Image (cartoon, coloured by chain):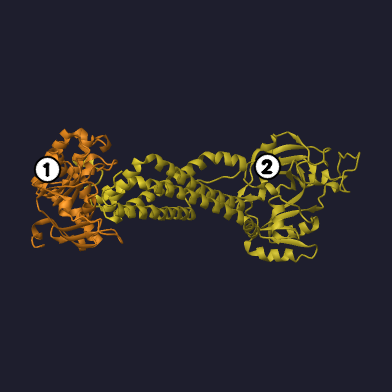
Amino acid sequence: MTAVVAGCAVALSNLHFGWPDQPDLLTVDDFQLHRGERLFLHGPSGSGKTTLLNLLAGVLTPRSGEIQLLGAPFSSCSARQRDRIRADHLGFIFQVFNLLPYLSLLDNVLLPCRFSLLRRQRACERFGSEVEAARYLLATLELDHNGLLKRPVSQLSVGQQQRVAAVRALIGDPELIIADEPTSALDSDRRQAFIELLTAQVEHSQSALLFVSHDHSLKPYFQRAASLPEIAGQVG
Amino acid sequence: MMKRSTFWPSSSSQSLMLLGLAWRSLLNRRTSVLLTLLAISLSVLLLLGVEKVRVEARTSFANTISGTDLVVGARSGQVQLLLYSVFRMGNATNNISWESYQKIAGHRQVAWTVPIALGDSHRGYSVIGTNQDYFRFYRYGRKQPLTFAEGKSFTQLHDVVLGSRVARELGYQLGDKIVVAHGMGSTSFAKHDDQPFTVTGILSPTGTPVDQSLHVSLEAIEAIHVGWESGVKLPGKTVTEFTPEQLQPTQVTAFLVGLKSKVATFQLQRAINNYRGEPLLAILPGVALQQLWQLIGVAEQALLAISALVVLTGLLGMLTVLLSTLNERRREMAILRSVGARPWHILALLMLETMLITLVACILGTVLMYAGLYLAQPLIQQQLGLKIALGALTGWQLQLLGMVMLAGTLSGLIPAWQACRHALADGLSVKL
């Protein structure tokens, strides 16, 4: 069942998760996300999306079963190793409040390069310096005018903030981007613009994208769509 | 050019990066941080200030008398002798006869003596009968001699030299007439009002009991007591003319001794203590001062304990502020975790915050102390005669600062550990 994991960004098998002394909250028999693949994951509230994302992020550990990230046995790693894998290979975009209010736009974007040497090296290899990398990515998401770079992030619009969060997730080319309803705070025009820019950039950097959302109108931008109740046999 | 706009140095170590983050985060919450900073700074100021005043008071105390090898009085306790002869507090149990005084003053090892006759006062300040040697040989502080701010020493029988504080407090000037009262106490009914004294000199401030004394000649002490042989003034008897016999001193209360060679100190001390003519006591002023200081040392410790408690209160205030804002900062921690921060980064971040606050508070408290001393210096000198030196921090003060730093850093462990736990439990998505 786990034979093709080498080409997988994420591979879950026989995964069971539940809080101690409680029945399973989430079970996934078999799920794979290939490298470079863009997956649209939907599901009703309470179907375990946040639980799944926390398992993939390594902040929760499964009761049994296996999570493989980029071919590594993620779920059996130590907490330290999971922290390192997350820092080096994962980028996150959340619904709202992605940015540290006391850092400038540029400093927010550069945060992953502070905690991961690998992502800093990748950014430097591709663009000469991490700041150049940030600048390039900000330009692709139309955030490159100079006045903006020095402005406190609290003065940015929500749409701009989400694009900054996307740039931060993308810097240093992590293999997997996890986006948790990043468009829910945006109006439909901005939503469209955001998803176009994000998918284009993900395609360019060959990252896999796991995009969790309620909004089915975004489906056409993805190679594959799946519902969480479909991939997870829900218990309770 | 772009690099300038980011606050982290491009090749920074992680700790520098965390320091930058902690600093930015603190600036972002500047109001509560400033208040905390102020509270700790003030407690540091108090701690250092109390310590400084304690040291200065001790120095000033030890500086009351210097250059005197022995103090001699009637046999009593050494602290009591020191108190009445030097600090002008309390009363002597007995006097020394003039003959005994002359005999000891004539000892071959003795370089000089200063006689002191006590027992009279002026509005609560002691009147001391002495001679010109007082102004020549008495030393205080770092062997500083007494100097005259105005006028000169007594030359006539009814001349008086005032200590600086007496002159200032009572508003006396050269040429003023004053009346000496019999006995001690600020209001006395038995006054030597038939023989007023004229102020001929005012001494410069010394910060010692000299400032609170009035000085007259030994002969003047004899003169004002002519007709007081029974202890009270005989009614209707006013003396204006004195015979040399009447003015010849018959006794002194105590006397200070300076020796030709320090080596002889103990030898002479023993000789005086074994003096057969009358029971006498000779003390080494340094030893007696030390003993006296130990008596009041308890108050000193209490003062230090109180300021330590104030510091503790300040640190507890910081802890409260940090813990109460921690909940609002869970999102911040979650963001940091999502961009790759490990739990120890979160721990270090919070610890660095408390360290930064405590460090800045220590520096600010020290600066405030020096500023306060600088401003208060003239006032303290004027009011208390205490000259406070603006020296560098003492070893003990530095140790106190180190203890504050350590306590501050350790108290940072509590919110840091809490934040670390939250960050792990919250995962990466705290929805606020």
Classify residue A30 by image quadrant: bottom left
| Contact, mark 1 vs mark 2 (Cβ under 8 Å) | no
Chain letter behind tag 2: B
Pick the residue in front: B359 or A106.
A106
Pick the residue in front: A53 or A158.
A53
Type of the residue with mark 1: Lys
Residue B207 vs residue A93: left or right?
right
Q: Residues within 10 Å of mark 2 (few under 14, many from 20)?
A: many
Classify residue B92 by image quadrant: bottom right
Kindly identify which residue carries mark 1. Answer: A219
Chain letter behind tag 1: A
Q: Is residue A156 above or below residue A172?
A: above
Dots 1 and 2 on the same chain = no
How far apart in space, not on screen, are marks 1 and 2 (Cα)? Answer: 98 Å
Q: Position of residue B252 (x, y in %)?
A: 77, 53
Find residue B163 and name its label: 2
Is residue A174 visible in the rendered image? The answer is: no
Classify residue B195 by image quadrant: top right
Which mark is nearer the camera, 1 or 2? 1
Residue B370 vs residue B275: left or right?
left
Q: Position of residue A38 (x, y in %)?
A: 11, 48
Type of the residue with mark 2: Gly
- Element at label 1: helix
Look at the image and give the colour of chain A.
orange
